[in-house]
Image (cartoon, rainbow, N blue to C red):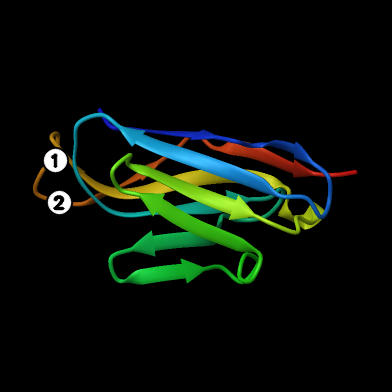
Amino acid sequence: QVQLVESGGGLVQPGRSLRLDCAASGSILSINAMGWYRQAPGKGRELVARVSPSGTTYGPSARGRFTISMDRGKNTVYLDMNSLRPEDTAIYYCYALMRDQEQPQYDRDHWGKGTQVTVSS
């Protein structure tokens, strides 16, 4: 079984920075893409950032403030969040498009359990 484990969430004051980490582990054959999505109370899940061999994509709320990076050697993706605002408060979910030993023929979506980020003074 493959697993995505997020860390780095918590309570942070507006204007401050926070770094999220997500490590993939298990019977991984390859990782195509990794990224971050978030869901605020009463809202749907939205893209924060995503990185793949074809490039990097940022959601509108993250563009200019957040930076995604990936260490393929560690199967880990990071999200550096700067100038945080109260509206950034959400559960942040790690995402990976991976191929594993259970289904080696196809890339499949995988999701972490999420980590809470609360921006408040």
Residue in the picture at 59% in, 52% down: 80
Within-10-Å neighbours for mark 1: few <14, some 14–19, many 20+: few
Q: Position of residue 47 (x, y in %)?
A: 53, 61
Q: Quadrant of the N terminus?
A: top left
Question: What residue lies at 55% left-to-right and 60% top-to-bottom?
Answer: 67
Disc 2 versus disc 1: distance between alpha carbons?
A: 6 Å
81 vs 60, nearest the viewer: 81
Q: Is 102 or 53 nearer to us in this picture?
A: 53
The answer to whether 7 is drawn above or below residue 81 in the figure is above
Q: Which amino acid type is shown beneath numbered disc 2?
A: Tyr
Task: Please provide percent x and percent y for residue 77.
Answer: 43, 47
Count numbered badges in the picture: 2
Q: What element does badge 1 sit on?
A: loop
Snapshot quadrant of residue 116: top right
Provide the residue designation for mark 1.
103
Single out the residue that lies furthest toward the left: 105
Marks 2 and 1: CB-CB under 8 Å?
A: yes
Amino acid type, residue under disc 1 in the picture? Gln
Q: Residues within 10 Å of mark 2 (few under 14, many from 20)?
A: few
Residue 36 position within the rendered picture, expressed as x and y whole percent measured from the top left = 50, 52
Which mark is drawn over residue 52? Answer: none
Q: Farthest residue in the right direction?
A: 121
Decide: is 76 above or below 57: above
- As helix, strand or loop, the secondary structure at mark 2 comes to loop
In the rendered image, which quarter contains the C terminus? top right
Residue at 25% over, 29% down: 26
Label of residue 106 in the image: 2
Residue at 85% in and 44% down: 120
